[in-house]
Image (tube, coloured by chain):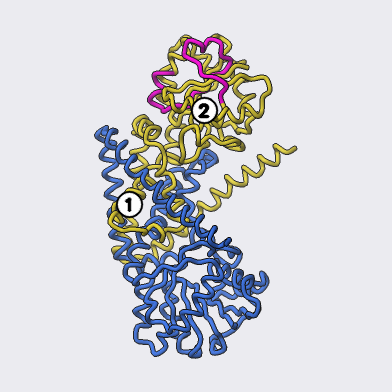
Chain colours: A blue, B yellow
Amino acid sequence: MKIVIIGVGLIGGSFALDLKEKFDDIELAGMDQNEDNLNRALELGFIDKAVSLQQLNEADLVFMAIPVDAALKVLPEVLNLVNDDCVVIDAGSTKKNLCAVVEGHPKRRNYLAAHPIAGTEFSGPEAAIRGLFRNKTNIVCEVEKTAFKLQDKAFEVFKAIGMNIRYMDPESHDRHIAYVSHLSHISSFMLGKTVLEKEKNERDIFDLAGSGFASTVRLAKSSPEMWTPIFRQNKKNIMEILDDYILNLQNFKGLMENDNFEEIFEEMQRTNHIKEVLNGINKNEELKVEDHGK
Amino acid sequence: MKIVIIGVGLIGGSFALDLKEKFDDIELAGMDQNEDNLNRALELGFIDKAVSLQQLNEADLVFMAIPVDAALKVLPEVLNLVNDDCVVIDAGSTKKNLCAVVEGHPKRRNYLAAHPIAGTEFSGPEAAIRGLFRNKTNIVCEVEKTAFKLQDKAFEVFKAIGMNIRYMDPESHDRHIAYVSHLSHISSFMLGKTVLEKEKNERDIFDLAGSGFASTVRLAKSSPEMWTPIFRQNKKNIMEILDDYILNLQNFKGLMENDNFEEIFEEMQRTNHIKEVLNGINKNEELKVEDHGK
């Protein structure tokens, strides 16, 4: 199987590493508009060679992991160039615009819209890690628009690297992901900004910060190149939930102002329900690991 | 050495576990107004027996890890009861009010105001873990008001469990901790609340949440019993930084509304500086581990 990874960063690189481990007879080629990253990926050995767009017609599977604005331009070009038996998968964090852009493309059946819910706050080829996708959810949109045998090919790969598939329409995807992913990035970036500004004249003050602060600002290390176009493409959904978040913070501040700590207590107690929600995720993951072991 | 732990939860329990490991000749007794917790601590074995306030006069060291509102009442009583050679340490997350309450106490010299920057989002005796304090910062306030030999006794214990001491006045402590700890808890609670409200009619939607969401809402699992009095006592500092946080979020929303994604990009890039800040913390920890090994 000939595979081309477009964008050899955290996601593309981790995908390549897993594939190399799980499949015997594969050839992994890479493309990246950043030449340094491409060379680093070659050095790290998760791709065997660099290829150009013109060589895409030989690929059996193309995996795109590039910023979502670039994807809008690159995906139609890639589809123009691949052969009829090649499946093109993208891993971007927004799906509505990209699905719309290739809606009428003559090779729409070669495309599978995916979003693996996996990653870290780091980026670039050095950030690629083995097993990143294991027991993680992969959201697939508009699966019915992909040719049957190309779905099969993609799902064989997803299964091999341990992913759990969920189907969703692109609009619902973008809405729910605004809530459970994009908002977290904004809350984290603004938290980091607020505290950095406040402590800018203090030395060593972050020695006082514990694991709680580290956890809530972790996502503020994320790549602006990747996240700016996500915020742009999912503007409507993000602004809606960001409004709710700001209102809840203002309400909390109002309760503090009025010394209504009884209501603050109750609000926190109700929100503690997040424990069960997150435990649910962990339980699912444990079950999946067990299933895998059988 | 006879030690009494007042409040046998996450912090008190973890302190007891470490002490048991590091000191040979100690007797660990516990007190807790929650009888279930006290029995659980006895079952788990990190305390040897339960004691009453009347038995405090035998203690060599008292460690208080209870909600900060309860501490205001309990600390003066404890100081009334202990002998002259006993050091009383508290581990609460606010220091100004507590230091003020015992300012003129005849046994002020027996008290050492501390704040170990260590913990998890869990609470109660079951949450106690070994090594929680290792390589963590312990902020000590008004050290000059504690008797020399009682300082020595406390620092011997802190050193044994691997803590790194920082000195600070109570007002500065409360202010900086509002920024690097208390605000994170509010941002996390409100994020959890916002998403739970938005997704309340959806089933299984949290299957879509990844490690980023889990990281930013982790603190929303924290105990309302512990956190409500912290917010009450540190109201002024918290409201000030909460205002800044809300303004930054509103500003971000404004940039999105005006499609000013160039500025959003630059703002995120500037905030990426948090990487070095957090790496600094990690580097310090590594250095400390090395020092320890020498």
Going 34% across and 57% down the picture, which residue do you hit? B252
Going 41% across and 46% down the picture, which residue do you hit? A275
Q: Which mark is residue B41?
A: 2
Residue B43 at x, y percent in the picture: 53, 28
Mark 2 chain: B
Quadrant for the N terminus of chain A, please.
bottom right
Amino acid beneath label 1: Leu
In the rendered structure, does residue A213 fall within the stretch colored magenta?
no
Furthest residue to the front?
A294
In the rendered structure, does residue B54 fall within the stretch colored magenta?
yes
Is residue A239 left or right of B172 when viewed as pictured?
Answer: left
In this rendering, does residue B271 appear at all?
A: no
Mark 1 chain: B
Q: Above or below — where is B66 with respect to A218?
A: above
Residue B174 at x, y percent in the picture: 43, 32
Going 54% across and 19% down the picture, which residue do you hit? B49
Residue A133 at x, y percent in the picture: 53, 64
Dot 1: what SS? helix
In this rendering, does residue B46 appear at all?
A: yes
Q: In this view of the protein, which residue sits in the foreground, A104 or B206?
A: B206
**C-alpha span from label 1 to label 2:** 34 Å
Q: Are marks 1 and 2 on the same chain?
A: yes
Q: In this view of the protein, which residue sits in the foreground, B259 or B86?
A: B86
Specify start and end residues of the magenta stretch as a single range: B47-74
Dot 2: what SS? helix
Q: Which mark is residue B196?
A: 1
Q: In this view of the protein, which residue sits in the foreground, A135 or A29?
A: A135
Q: Above or below — where is B10 with respect to A95?
A: above
Q: Above or below — where is B111 with respect to A101?
A: above
| Numbered marks: total | 2
Q: Residue A100's image quarter?
A: bottom left
| Chain-order first, disc 1 or disc 2 | 2
